[in-house]
Image (cartoon, rainbow, N blue to C red):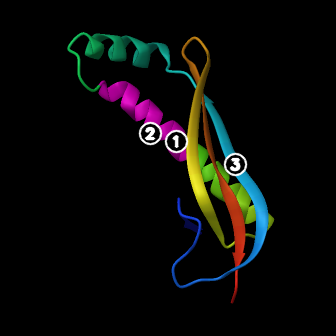
Amino acid sequence: MIVTTGLTIVGSEIAQVMGVVRGVVVRSPNIGQSFLGSLQSLGGGNIETFAQICDEARQHAYDRMVQHAQQMGADAIIGMRYDATEFAQSMTEVLAYGTAVKLRS
């Protein structure tokens, strides 16, 4: 599956716009991750434990978005973006979204 943040795919022509696809996950660190991240935050700088949690959440949301596009029969996703919203203490929604398209054969 081709996924791009752009609105075109070099060398391909979009034959059909199939609609918006998305992948949503809600993540919260477990108690061990919270404790370790809190300790790492004392030193300042990048908090690797929390960075890994964020990266995993983005990957999971991305995978769900691609699966949604595959279920629609899409060949590619254009205009792909991420969004994240904290909606409760220590709970973050991560959204991957884009436009599913069919490419001309």
**Compared to 13, does 34 lie above or below?**
above
Name the quadrant of the N terminus: bottom right
Is 44 on the left-hand or right-hand side of 18?
left
Q: In this figure, which residue is indicated by the disc labeled 3?
A: 22
Task: Find the residue positioned furthest to the bottom.
Answer: 105
Labels 3 and 2: the sequence-earlier one: 3
Q: Given this view, does label 3 or label 2 mark the residue nearer the observer?
A: 3
Give the class, few, some or many, for how many residues have Cα within 10 Å of label 2's Cα (few <14, many ≥20).
few
- Could you say where residue 22 lies in the image, as x and y percent from the top left? 69, 48
Q: Main secondary structure of the magenta part?
A: helix
Q: Which residue: 63% across, 64% down?
A: 77
Q: In this figure, which residue is indicated by the disc labeled 2?
A: 55
**Compared to 49, does 32 lie above or below?**
above
Question: Does the magenta run of residues contain 72?
Answer: no
Q: Amino acid at mark 2?
A: Asp
Labels 3 and 1: the sequence-earlier one: 3
Q: In this figure, which residue is indicated by the disc labeled 1?
A: 58
Q: Which residue: 55% across, 75% down?
A: 9
Q: Secondary structure at mark 2?
A: helix
Q: CA distance from mark 3 to mark 2?
A: 17 Å
**Compared to 7, does 51 lie above or below?**
above
Give the class, few, some or many, for how many residues have Cα within 10 Å of label 1's Cα (few <14, many ≥20).
many
Disc 2 to disc 1: CB gap under 8 Å:
yes
Question: Between residues 88 and 28, which one lies in front from this camera angle?
Answer: 88
Q: Amino acid at mark 3?
A: Arg
Q: Which residues are magenta?
A: 47-60
**Compared to 70, does 21 lie above or below?**
above
Q: Secondary structure at mark 1?
A: helix
Name the quadrant of the C terminus: bottom right
